Image (cartoon, grey):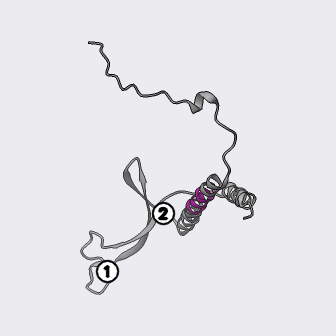
Protein backbone atom coordinates (compact mmCIF):
# COMPACT_ATOMS: atom_id res chain seq x y z
CA UNK A 1 0.00 0.00 0.00
CA UNK A 2 1.49 3.40 -0.95
CA UNK A 3 2.23 5.92 1.77
CA UNK A 4 -0.72 8.40 1.95
CA UNK A 5 1.22 10.92 4.06
CA UNK A 6 2.63 13.11 1.25
CA UNK A 7 -0.81 13.55 -0.33
CA UNK A 8 -2.43 14.28 3.04
CA UNK A 9 0.29 16.77 3.97
CA UNK A 10 -0.17 18.52 0.61
CA UNK A 11 -3.90 18.67 1.23
CA UNK A 12 -3.26 20.16 4.69
CA UNK A 13 -0.90 22.77 3.22
CA UNK A 14 -3.55 23.74 0.65
CA UNK A 15 -6.20 24.13 3.37
CA UNK A 16 -3.85 26.30 5.44
CA UNK A 17 -3.20 28.46 2.38
CA UNK A 18 -6.93 28.88 1.76
CA UNK A 19 -7.50 29.83 5.42
CA UNK A 20 -4.73 32.42 5.25
CA UNK A 21 -6.42 34.05 2.24
CA UNK A 22 -9.79 34.56 3.96
CA UNK A 23 -11.08 38.10 4.16
CA UNK A 24 -13.15 39.91 6.77
CA UNK A 25 -15.61 37.63 8.51
CA UNK A 26 -18.12 37.62 11.32
CA UNK A 27 -20.62 35.13 12.70
CA UNK A 28 -24.35 35.59 12.69
CA UNK A 29 -27.52 35.30 10.67
CA UNK A 30 -29.39 37.87 8.64
CA UNK A 31 -33.12 37.97 9.29
CA UNK A 32 -35.94 40.14 8.02
CA UNK A 33 -38.82 41.77 9.87
CA UNK A 34 -42.01 43.34 8.63
CA UNK A 35 -44.26 45.23 10.99
CA UNK A 36 -46.87 47.80 11.69
CA UNK A 37 -46.14 51.14 13.27
CA UNK A 38 -47.95 52.81 16.15
CA UNK A 39 -49.82 55.36 14.04
CA UNK A 40 -53.43 54.08 13.64
CA UNK A 41 -53.96 56.21 10.49
CA UNK A 42 -50.91 54.81 8.69
CA UNK A 43 -51.35 52.69 5.54
CA UNK A 44 -49.82 49.72 7.33
CA UNK A 45 -52.98 49.28 9.42
CA UNK A 46 -55.12 48.62 6.33
CA UNK A 47 -56.33 45.05 6.20
CA UNK A 48 -54.53 44.06 2.98
CA UNK A 49 -51.38 46.15 3.46
CA UNK A 50 -48.20 44.12 4.08
CA UNK A 51 -46.85 46.66 6.57
CA UNK A 52 -43.51 48.40 6.80
CA UNK A 53 -40.33 46.66 5.76
CA UNK A 54 -38.69 44.38 5.16
CA UNK A 55 -35.99 45.46 7.58
CA UNK A 56 -32.80 43.42 7.60
CA UNK A 57 -30.99 42.61 10.84
CA UNK A 58 -27.86 40.76 11.83
CA UNK A 59 -28.39 38.47 14.82
CA UNK A 60 -25.48 36.87 16.67
CA UNK A 61 -24.43 35.68 20.12
CA UNK A 62 -22.04 37.72 22.26
CA UNK A 63 -21.11 36.34 25.69
CA UNK A 64 -24.17 34.08 25.61
CA UNK A 65 -26.60 36.88 24.78
CA UNK A 66 -28.31 37.57 21.48
CA UNK A 67 -27.28 40.85 19.90
CA UNK A 68 -29.19 42.35 16.97
CA UNK A 69 -27.85 44.98 14.58
CA UNK A 70 -30.00 46.83 12.04
CA UNK A 71 -28.38 47.87 8.77
CA UNK A 72 -28.34 51.53 7.83
CA UNK A 73 -28.19 50.97 4.07
CA UNK A 74 -28.33 48.27 1.40
CA UNK A 75 -24.53 48.58 1.09
CA UNK A 76 -24.13 47.71 4.80
CA UNK A 77 -26.39 44.69 4.28
CA UNK A 78 -24.30 43.48 1.32
CA UNK A 79 -21.09 43.95 3.30
CA UNK A 80 -22.48 41.87 6.18
CA UNK A 81 -23.66 39.15 3.77
CA UNK A 82 -20.11 38.87 2.37
CA UNK A 83 -18.60 38.73 5.87
CA UNK A 84 -21.03 36.03 7.01
CA UNK A 85 -20.38 33.99 3.86
CA UNK A 86 -16.64 34.24 4.55
CA UNK A 87 -17.22 33.06 8.13
CA UNK A 88 -19.12 30.01 6.88
CA UNK A 89 -16.28 29.31 4.44
CA UNK A 90 -13.86 29.51 7.39
CA UNK A 91 -15.95 26.98 9.33
CA UNK A 92 -15.93 24.57 6.37
CA UNK A 93 -12.17 24.92 5.86
CA UNK A 94 -11.51 24.47 9.60
CA UNK A 95 -13.59 21.30 9.67
CA UNK A 96 -11.70 19.96 6.63
CA UNK A 97 -8.34 20.85 8.22
CA UNK A 98 -9.20 18.93 11.39
CA UNK A 99 -10.30 15.92 9.33
CA UNK A 100 -7.06 15.90 7.31
CA UNK A 101 -4.96 16.28 10.46
CA UNK A 102 -6.78 13.32 12.01
CA UNK A 103 -5.96 11.22 8.95
CA UNK A 104 -2.32 12.34 9.10
CA UNK A 105 -2.06 11.41 12.77
CA UNK A 106 -3.49 7.96 12.07
CA UNK A 107 -1.23 7.38 9.04
CA UNK A 108 2.03 8.62 10.57
CA UNK A 109 4.14 5.72 11.88
CA UNK A 110 5.19 5.55 15.51
CA UNK A 111 8.71 6.97 15.91
CA UNK A 112 11.48 5.63 18.14
CA UNK A 113 11.42 3.18 21.00
CA UNK A 114 10.57 3.60 24.62
CA UNK A 115 13.29 4.32 27.12
CA UNK A 116 13.76 1.68 29.84
CA UNK A 117 12.25 3.94 32.50
CA UNK A 118 9.16 4.37 30.33
CA UNK A 119 8.78 0.63 29.89
CA UNK A 120 8.84 -0.10 33.60
CA UNK A 121 5.63 0.68 35.32
CA UNK A 122 5.50 0.70 39.08
CA UNK A 123 3.85 -2.39 40.48
CA UNK A 124 0.78 -1.91 42.54
CA UNK A 125 1.25 -2.87 46.10
CA UNK A 126 -1.01 -5.67 47.21
CA UNK A 127 -0.19 -5.15 50.86
CA UNK A 128 -2.41 -2.69 52.69
CA UNK A 129 -0.81 0.28 54.31
CA UNK A 130 -0.22 -0.37 58.03
CA UNK A 131 0.17 3.30 58.90
CA UNK A 132 -2.50 4.42 61.34
Front one among 26 and 78:
26
69 relative to 94 in the view: left or right: left
**Is 112 on the left or on the right of 55, as rendered?**
right
Q: Looking at the rendered structure, which numbered label has been put on residue 72? A: none
Q: Quadrant of the N terminus?
A: bottom right
Q: Which residues are magenta?
A: 91-100
Q: What predominant SS class does the magenta segment belong to?
A: helix
User: Could you say which quadrant of the image residue 23 lies in?
Assistant: bottom right
| Residue at x 36% of width, y 51% of height | 65
**Foreground residue among 28 and 126:** 126
- Earlier in the chain: of badge 1 and badge 2, it is 1
Image location of residue 9, percent across then percent down: 72, 56
Which residue reaches farthest top? 132
- Residue 95 in percent (x, y) is at 56, 59
Local secondary structure at mark 1: helix
Measured from the top left, where is residue 119 in percent x and y? 58, 33
What is the C-alpha distance between the residues marked 1 and 2?
A: 24 Å
Label 2 residue SS: loop
Q: Tell me if residue 17 can be seen.
A: no
Residue at the disc numbered 1: 43
Residue 102: name its quadrant. bottom right
Residue 16 position in % (x across, y down): 68, 55
Would you name the residue on which mark 2 appears?
A: 71
Q: Is residue 1 magenta?
A: no
- Residue 49, visible in the rendered structure: yes
- Asked if the stretch drawn in magenta spans residue 94, the answer is yes
Q: Nearer the viewer, mark 1 or mark 2?
A: 2
Identity of the residue drawn at 62% across and 29% down: 116
Q: For the C terminus, give its image quadrant.
A: top left
Say few, some or many: other residues with alpha carbon within 10 Å of mark 2 (under 14 / 14 to 19 / 20 or more): some
Amino acid sequence: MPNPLPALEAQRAELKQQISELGDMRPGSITTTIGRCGNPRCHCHDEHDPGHGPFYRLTRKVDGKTVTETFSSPAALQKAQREIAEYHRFLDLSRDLVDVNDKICRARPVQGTMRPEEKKRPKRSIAKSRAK
